[in-house]
Amino acid sequence: MRRLKVVLGSMLLALVPVTVLATPAHAAVRLGGVSVAGACANQWPGSQVVLLSQNVFGWKCRFWSSLGPVYYGVNLNQQCAAQYGGGAYASYSDYNNPYSWSCYR
């Protein structure tokens, strides 16, 4: 009989819902601005930074070739890590403002 009580008690315990509280996420800390010109210089030496469209993804690195301009993308996450160390990443606050990029950790 004792064994039956233990088994039944275990079964009832298994039916009790368990609430798990997640630890709160830490807010990202703004480290500062990101240098888009520095990103072009680091990632595409000899290029110049240009803004082709008025949004956060309008930044490009431009080379001049005999056929005209050649454009390359810029990696602002890589630039944040170069400026502020490992774990830094880029984020923007306003899609329509290409100058709203900052670095966070």
Image (tube, rainbow, N blue to C red):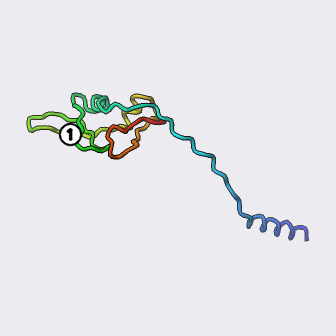
Q: Is residue 57 left or right of residue 64?
A: right
Q: Residue at x 24, y 33 (%)?
A: 49
Q: Nearer the viewer, residue 96 or 64?
A: 96
Outermost residue to the left: 66
Q: Position of residue 12 (x, y in %)?
A: 78, 68
Q: Residues within 10 Å of mark 1 (few under 14, many from 20)?
A: some
At which x and y percent is residue 56?
A: 32, 43
Q: Residue at x 86, y 70 (%)?
A: 4
Q: Is residue 93 above or below residue 44?
A: below
Identify the image quadrant of residue 44: top left
The furthest residue to the right: 1
Write down the residue under mark 1. 71
- Residue 83 in percent (x, y) is at 40, 28
Q: 77 or 10: which is nearer to us? A: 77
Callout 1 amino acid: Tyr
Q: The N terminus appears in which quarter of the rendering?
A: bottom right
Total marks placed: 1
